[in-house]
Image (spheres, rainbow, N blue to C red):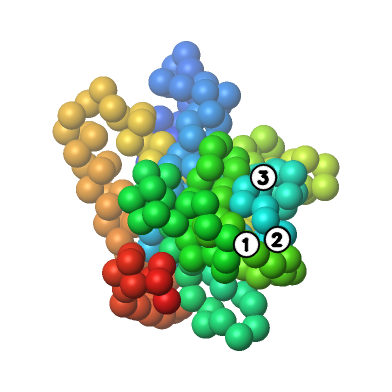
Amino acid sequence: MKRGELRDYIRLLADELTEAPEGLFTDTELNSLINISQQNVALALVPFIPWAVTKTFLISVTANKREYDLVTDFSLSDFFMMDGIFHNENGYEQKELLYLERDQLVEYKIKGETRDPKVWSYHSAGIIAFDPTPDQTVADKYLASYIPIFKDLNDDSTHNPDQNKYAIPFNGSSILIPTHPLIAFDVLKQWHIRGEEESVDINERYKEMLNSTLFTMQQSQGVTWKAILPVKEMINR
């Protein structure tokens, strides 16, 4: 659905086909809610079907360099949240690199060493760090998966990123077309916040649609479960 179609669908579901002052929201206000809901739905999908929402980039490490700026070092302009960092180098199992909080680096006494990295962490906003600090320069050592910031929809019918026109949710992703109705129901969750019974009904319909969509997409892709080793064992391997 394009933005104009999505807005019409929302008004149809709400049984309010005209905009303010006759209706509750103007088209401009509803457009803002649609953009908020696009991000809400993306975050709801990530834990279950990350392959459909995330993007990837390669990480090259430099000897004795611990910290890396996501913008400066990797040219990322749409980064929102990291999903995971995976080994990409020949000779390594293609497993996920362990993530630790900064206080855990102290707990496990891993910070300050220089050898093959065992973990990654957030050093500060927009900067990631590897510990131990890499002792070699290696091109494309890791493959990182991240959740992007999806562009706000700014056009009702024309989708052309080259002209900075976005009409289709999730940057025009065809994979996520089945999730477009979830955006409408998420908007209605905001729309009906003032009515308790209406809010309960909308929330239930949203959950049913979310579960149905996830079930279908997970079945088509397949789900793989993997065991996670204890932190100390992963660090010392």
Q: Earlier in the sequence, mark 2 or mark 3?
A: 2
Dot in front, 2 or 3:
2
The circle drawn on residue 69 is: 3
Asked if 108 appears above or below 154 in the picture, the reply is: below
Gap between marks 2 and 3, in whole Å? 16 Å
Helix, strand or loop status at disc 3 = strand
Q: Percent from the top left, x then y, of residue 198?
A: 22, 34
The circle drawn on residue 63 is: 2
The circle drawn on residue 134 is: 1
Q: Residues within 10 Å of mark 1 (few under 14, many from 20)?
A: many
The residue closer to the viewer here, 173 or 188, is: 173
Furthest residue toward left: 197
Q: Residue at x 22, y 48 (%)?
A: 204
Furthest residue toward right: 163
**Where's the C terminus, which quadrant?**
bottom left
Residue 51 as seen in the image, left or right of residue 235: right
Q: Residue at x 29, y 69 (%)?
A: 230
Q: Residues within 10 Å of mark 2 (few under 14, many from 20)?
A: some
Please name the amino acid that badge 3 sits on. Asp
- Note whether residue 179 is visible: no
Image quarter of residue 151: top right
Q: Residues within 10 Å of mark 3 (few under 14, many from 20)?
A: some
The circle drawn on residue 15 is: none
